[in-house]
C-alpha cells in the first residue's frame, strides 16, 4: 500500500546536515511522527539510535521483529532497553500458518540447503512481519551503515524505499564506523547484547549467526555458508535518494 508523503519531506530531510544523526532524526520526527518508527534488532547501531531518538521525542515509536529463533541474549537486551527507557516496543511475529508448514514439510534447518531456501525462511520470519510493521508508516529508520557489507556500500542517509510503496527510509548512521558506534555505546553506558563480548559483530537469528574471527568482514558471521553478495534477508533493498 502506497502512503501519502508530506510534500516537502524529501527536500526538508535533504536540507539538514546528514552527517548529524540528531538533526536527521529531529527533522524526521517533525515531518512524520507518529507515522515514523525505528526498526530495532537491538544491534549496537539500533541501541545508539534508540538513545538519540528518545532524547528528541520520548514518545517516538520503536518496533522489533521476533522471528522465534533469536538468541536469549537478544531478548535480554530488548528487556534491558524496555526497562531503561520505559519503552513500549511494538513487537511483530511471523504468522503461525506460514511457520508451521515450513518446519513440518522442510525441517528446522531448510535455510541451509540453498540461498532460495534461506530466503524463504527469511521471508516468513522477517520480511512478511516487516511489511505489517511498515503498514501505514510514511517513513522508517534503520541502523544500516555503509561499512557493514558490500551490499550496503551505496547506502544513503535518506532514500526512497521502492520495495515498500515509496515510503522514506532513513539511515542516520550510514557514515559511521563500527568504532564510532562502540564509542557512543560505551560513553553513554548503553545496555547491549552480550554476544558482542563473545566475538559477534552482526547478530540475527541464532542458527544463522556466529562469532567473527579476527580480520573477517563485519557480516562474515551471518549466513557464513553463503557468498557475501547474497547476505541480505530481504528486509533491506537498495533504494534511491529522493529527488530534491
Image: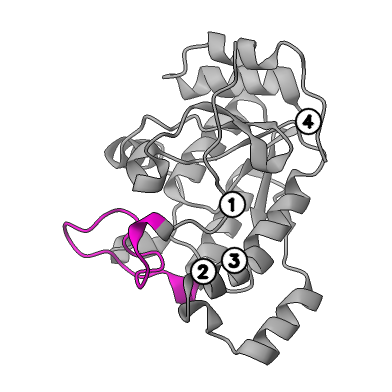
Q: Earlier in the sequence, mark 1 or mark 2?
A: 2
Q: Is residue 32 above or below residue 228?
A: above
Q: Position of residue 198 (x, y in %)?
A: 30, 66
Compared to 235, does 198 lie above or below?
below
Which is nearer the N-term, disc 3 or disc 4? 4
**Label 2 sits on residue:** 205
Q: Earlier in the sequence, mark 2 or mark 3?
A: 3
Could you tell me which secondary element the residue under label 1 belongs to?
loop
Q: Residues within 10 Å of mark 4 (few under 14, many from 20)?
A: some
Q: Is residue 70 visible?
A: no
Please state which of the two labelled residues, at mark 3 or mark 4, is closer to the viewer: 3
Q: Is residue 242 above or below residue 111?
A: above
Mark 4 or 1, which is nearer the eye? 1
Is residue 233 in sight in this rendering?
yes
Instruction: Please report contact status of discs 1 and 3: CB closer than 8 Å, yes or no.
Output: yes
Q: Which residue is mark 4?
A: 34
Magenta highlight on residue 202: no
Q: Residues within 10 Å of mark 3 (few under 14, many from 20)?
A: many
Labelled disc at residue 122: 3
- The residue drawn where x is 74% and y is 84% is 101
Q: Position of residue 171 (x, y in %)?
A: 51, 33
**Of the image marks 2 and 4, the number of the one nearer the N terminus:** 4
User: How far apart, in angstroms, are the residues tagged by discs 1 and 3?
Assistant: 9 Å
Report which quarter residue 175 is drawn in: top left
Please report the bounds of the magenta region as a residue range. Answer: 206-229
Task: Please name whichever residue, 171 or 116, is drawn nearer the observer in this view of the structure.
Answer: 116
Whole-angstrom CA distance, mark 3 to mark 4, is 28 Å
Residue 231 screen position, x and y as percent: 43, 59
Q: Quadrant of residue 215?
A: bottom left
**Which one is closest to the eye, mark 2 or mark 3?**
3
| 188, 151: nearer the viewer | 151
Estimate the x, y position of residue 84 in percent, counting from the top left.
58, 46
Amino acid at each position: 500500500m502506497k502512503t501519502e508523503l508530506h510534500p516537502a519531506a524529501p527536500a526538508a530531510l535533504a536540507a539538514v546536515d546528514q552527517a548529524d544523526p540528531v538533526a536527521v532524526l529531529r527533522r524526521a520526527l517533525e515531518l512524520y511522527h507518529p507515522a515514523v518508527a525505528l526498526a530495532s534488532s537491538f544491534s549496537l547501531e539500533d541501541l545508539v539510535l534508540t538513545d538519540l531518538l528518545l532524547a528528541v521525542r520520548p514518545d517516538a515509536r520503536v518496533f522489533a521483529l521476533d522471528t522465534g529463533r533469536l538468541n536469549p541474549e537478544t531478548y535480554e537486551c530488548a528487556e534491558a532497553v524496555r526497562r531503561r527507557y520505559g519503552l513500549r516496543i511494538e513487537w511483530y511475529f511471523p504468522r503461525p500458518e506460514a511457520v508451521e508448514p515450513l518446519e513440518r514439510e522442510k525441517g528446522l534447518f531448510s535455510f541451509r540447503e540453498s540461498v532460495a531456501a534461506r530466503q524463504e525462511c527469511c521471508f516468513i520470519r522477517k520480511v512478511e512481519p516487516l511489511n505489517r510493521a511498515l503498514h501505514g508508516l510514511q517513513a522508517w529508520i534503520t541502523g544500516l551503515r555503509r561499512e557493514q557489507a558490500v551490499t550496503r556500500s551505496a547506502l544513503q542517509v535518506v532514500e526512497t524505499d521502492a520495495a515498500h510503496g515509496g515510503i522514506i527510509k532513513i539511515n542516520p548512521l550510514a557514515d559511521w564506523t563500527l568504532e564510532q558506534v562502540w564509542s557512543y555505546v560505551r560513553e553513554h553506558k548503553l545496555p547491549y547484547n552480550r554476544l558482542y563480548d563473545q566475538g559477534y559483530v552482526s547478530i540475527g537469528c541464532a542458527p544463522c549467526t556466529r562469532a567473527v574471527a579476527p580480520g573477517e568482514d563485519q557480516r562474515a558471521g551471518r549466513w557464513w555458508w553463503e557468498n557475501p553478495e547474497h547476505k541480505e534477508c530481504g528486509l533491506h533493498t537498495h533504494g534511491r535518494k529522493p529527488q530534491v
